[in-house]
Image (spheres, rainbow, N blue to C red):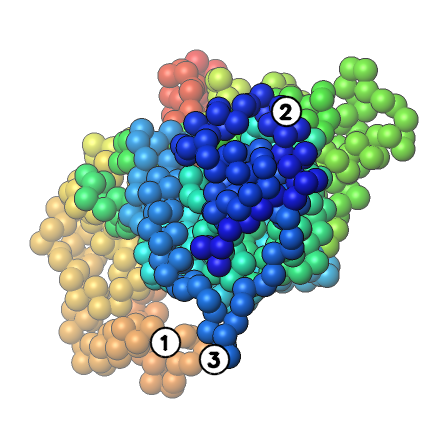
Amino acid sequence: MSGRSLCSSPEGIQKAKRALIRCSLTQKALAEDLGITRQPIGKFFTGKPVDRNLFVQICDRLNLEWEEIVAEPVSEPEVNQDNSIDIDIDAIVQEVRENIKPFIQERCGTMRVLDMTQPIGLNDIYTSVNILEKITGRQRLGIDELLQQCRSQDFDLFGLNKITEKRVPGLEAVEKCSKLMILGKPGAGKTTFLKYLAIQCLGGEFQAERVPIFVTLKNFAEAANKPGLLQHITEDTMNPISSIRDVLTYGKALVLLDGLDEVREEDNNRVLKEIREFSDRFPKNQFVITCRIAAREYTFEKFTEVEVADFDDDQISNFTNNWFKDKAVKPETFIKRLEENNRIKELAASPLLLTLLCLAFEESGDFPANRSELYKEGLDALLKKWDAKRGIQRDQIYQKLSVQRKEDLLSKMALTTFEGSDYFFKQKVAEQYITEYIRNLRDANTDEEALQLDSEKVLRSIEHHHGLVVARAKGIYSFSHLTFHEYFTAREFVVVRQSSEEALQNLVSHITEKRWREVFLLAVGMSPSADRLLLLMKEKIDVIVSSDIGLQRLLAWVNQKSFSVQVPYKISAVRALYLDLTSIFESRFAHGYLLATTIDSLLTPTHAFAPDFSLDLSLVYDLNLVRPHSCHHLDLNSISDSQLQKALQPLKEQLNNPELRLALETIKQYDERKRQYDKRDRNELLAWDKLLKWREQLRPVLVKYRNIGHDWQFTDKQKKLFKQYYDANKLLVDCLNSDCYVSREVRQQIENTLLLPIAEIKQHQQQS
């Protein structure tokens, strides 16, 4: 086929001459432009035979379809009796693959996003993509069903991004469908996947019998003279159009069309028409198009739509190992810190935000102490940088909504939904929030119907442009990450309402609600000064147990004991440790030790305690039978108080009693097996009974000589109240230890009065 000659028809010659004038060319200039002699140009304009390749090139340069210029219709390739085609298409494919290799490697071989200082090889960083065969936002599920699918065991593990859906490897999805539309949230890895397909195809690892053709649709749409898709492919790849046409005609191309959502509104219809006509004209080829979810309502009847899935734990690990390979920071360190912080790990499900996390971690070897700054950087990436870095200007759906206005709108929406525990909300509800916000903007249209239409567009714009609010099912939305929901909630108090007294009082009213923990941490982190918020938190916490006489007596005792020992730790940390010795918590030492170490970072198990304090710990261990076999270690020689030694001697001797020793060994065995209480057998229960009797003899001795071991006999209601008090104090201390700005005076005031009874706090206030 490629050796046949073609002639111009009389009508075609006239069209060509007009095109020559339109392009401001002469025949000589046309020849020079194509790098050929004037002879074939002269033949072309006189209707004489011209080599087919040159004929098509001339038409292409003049922006003409060669089929409209040729003298007679071009027949289909002739097939011999043995069904062999009269050209060697495989040879042409290999030739084009070689010619196109530099272009594909230059266009697709590297990636560079956000604040990377230099590009990185695609194969050095690429992590396999998974595909959801059902579009998430088109599921017909109710809010209750979505909440069930989160499979949360604890609110801290609440997984908005772990909604289960069948996943298939990306390459498998492409193999399965000859025409595929891949949808995904901003930064989901769509372009990277398309580049990977091109590189794999070129390297013979995937569909080696095809030629990869990579088209950035934004560049195509904005190309000068608005060429057709075939012409753009030829000019963009700098390859002979006849060879490309042969490849396409025989279905030997892997056509990769990237970023349909990046096409400007004014170019949209033309580009859609080109894609439809092109895919219909060359139907035997493999087509893959990428586009953001909710960008526009596209209709490609012959294309199967799928969605890029968020990264799972294995993908996060693979990406991390690739990123930190041969770097000072080890991937294991990054993964460990990620596992320690569920909220930051949530963001890692997005390839774009995972890249941001890696960049931040690589810079300092850890995540920023002030997580609000990290989240703000992630939001900036989605709201501004991601498009700006690639030169993409999105159509402004609502001109009055600047980036800051969008953040304010999202903050208002976040607080309203978070206060109502509405992690999922209906589309109409979201649109109503938007309507209420934009109606108050200056020069806003107050017509209700117009406001409704605007709110629909704004919601779709926020989903499409930034991916901060996303459809979880048909007509049901949520924030893309619980982290962002919490961030914008905190932002409403601190930024939008400017930490007004009313706003802060509203926030601290949630001090005992576990799900508000992250909001408090973020609020102090983003506050210019967290003094007032921290003081209000402290006041609210002290009120929790202020009216309970029994719990106030407990705090008074804790304060008294903290002054009876000399240790190189903050007095509030010592109070926390003694607090645990009351056995008010089922988990014994773990709670107090956690708070104590939070208060004083130097307090670790390897540090030596003062002798009298160590004695208290040892004796209460025995009293509470935290470690039943520890009773053997009751060392009277370490006790300097002779009266206490004398009182403990009979109890020490009892430990040598065969029955009690057998009981200790029995309990030790059950303790090692971690048997549950309801599964204990009769022998164990008898053993426990013996030890409990021994313990009750120990208690009055400890109360008399060491002022420890009191049986406070708190009710379940008091225990619940004190648990709220304890957890709220832990939150307050975590806020103080975060990278927030708080004056020395306020920090000292809070630390001095931590875990004190109300009477002592009032005394401190009078003295200051």
- Find out whether the residues at labels 2 and 3 contact each other: C-beta distance under 8 Å: no
Direction from residue 752 to residue 545 in the image, left or right: right
Say few, some or many: other residues with alpha carbon within 10 Å of mark 2 (under 14 / 14 to 19 / 20 or more): few
Direction from residue 481 to residue 351 in the image, left or right: left
Residue farthest to the left, as pictured = 637
Circle 3 or circle 1, nearest the eye: 3
Residue 174 x/y as whole percent: 50, 62
Q: Secondary structure at mark 1?
A: loop
Residue name at image x 33 percent, y 43 percent: 102
Residue name at image x 22 percent, y 68 percent: 629
Q: How far separated are the C-alphas under marks 3 and 1?
A: 79 Å
Q: Say what amino acid the circle numbered 2 marks.
A: Arg
Q: Identify the image quadrant of residue 48.
A: top right
Say few, some or many: other residues with alpha carbon within 10 Å of mark 1 (under 14 / 14 to 19 / 20 or more): few
Q: Say what amino acid the circle numbered 1 marks.
A: Arg
Q: Say what amino acid the circle numbered 3 marks.
A: Asp
Q: How far separated are the C-alphas under marks 2 and 3?
A: 47 Å
Q: Earlier in the sequence, mark 2 or mark 3?
A: 2
**Residue of label 1:** 675
Q: How far separated are the C-alphas under marks 2 and 1?
A: 90 Å
- Label ID, residue 625: none
Residue 518 x/y as whole percent: 51, 39
Q: Secondary structure at mark 2?
A: helix
Direction from residue 281 to residue 659 in the image, left or right: left
- Label ID, residue 22: 2
Residue 720 x/y as whole percent: 54, 51
**Residue of label 3:** 82
